[in-house]
Amino acid sequence: MNKLEGKLPKVYQVTSVVKKYKNYKEVTFSWFFIDRKKPLVPYKKGIMNYVEGDLYPEGAIDELFTNREAKRLVAYLEKEHKDDTLKINIDEQKLPIANNLMGYGGIAVGGMTDFYMLDKEKDYNLPFKAWGYFDLRNCKNVNEEIKESEKYESEHDKRIKELGKLSIQELNERKEVIMNEKEAIERVIEAKNIINSYKESGFLGVYIEIADKELPF
């Protein structure tokens, strides 16, 4: 009997992370094959407890890539999007998949989620269509980061102006309070470090040493 008989071919997922997309930082694109004409692998072997005509797991299988397809897609991304891409991953998808798995193409998109139609790019030259699913909901908005930075700078400037209204004597008094507080914090940190170091070592003599110190808490 042929050892390779019944063995499923290896299939892959491709993802990439770009620096910025639509004013959002570090956006992940999950790439998938569009409009595959023939099953990538026999559904009965590639899907657990397969029921004929179950479109969701069938789509999930056919969206994956062969090794050659994945490498060609990565080569295109590295060439056409090298300046804005942080990383690209090719990951093997174990088969068979669960029969309740849905591919990216089955996801209802809108608002912060959508598909990027890679095959619509001017210089796209791959012999198959590939789209990328992205979700901006957990990505950092560049404009919001700028607003936060501006807010901090505004609050800092406001604080400087408030201090500018104080006399030199009042400023010195505040400085003294801050210095005393800093000194107290440093003493507490030192004491806690001593306690923790002895606890970790299990040395019971810690209690003798602590008793001889005036701890600030």
Image: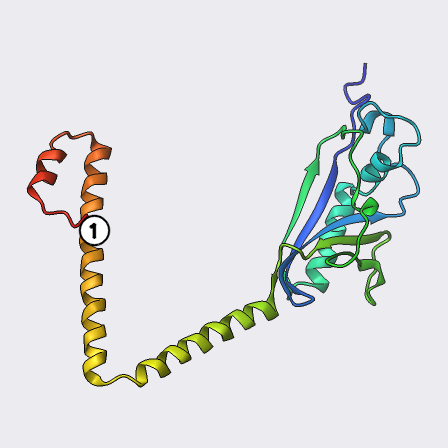
* In-image side of 164 versus 94 (left or right): left
Q: Nearer the viewer, residue 36 or 25?
A: 25
Tell me where residue 42 appears, x and y as whole percent. Answer: 87, 29
Residue type at mark 1? Val
Dividing the picture into quarters, in which one does residue 192 lie? top left
Quadrant (top left, top right, bottom left, bottom right) of the N terminus: top right
Residue at 78 percent across and 24 percent down: it is 7
Q: Nearer the viewer, residue 208 or 104?
A: 208
Tell me where residue 94 appears, x and y as whole percent. Answer: 71, 32
Against 148, residue 171 (above or below) is below
Residue at 21 percent across and 84 percent down: it is 168
> Which scheme is used to colour this image of the protein?
rainbow
- Badge 1 marks a residue whose secondary structure is helix
Against 132, residue 66 (above or below) is above
* In-image side of 140 versus 96 (left or right): left
* In-image side of 125 versus 84 (left or right): right
Would you name the residue on which mark 1 appears? Answer: 188
Tell me where residue 176 appears, x and y as whole percent. Answer: 18, 71
Residue at 75 percent across and 42 percent down: it is 67
Against 116, residue 10 (above or below) is above
Outermost residue on the top side: it is: 1
Q: Nearer the viewer, residue 90 or 143?
A: 143
Q: Residues within 10 Å of mark 1 (few under 14, many from 20)?
A: some
Dividing the picture into quarters, in which one does residue 143 lie? bottom right
The number of numbered discs placed on residues in the rendered structure image is 1
Q: Nearer the viewer, residue 76 or 84?
A: 84
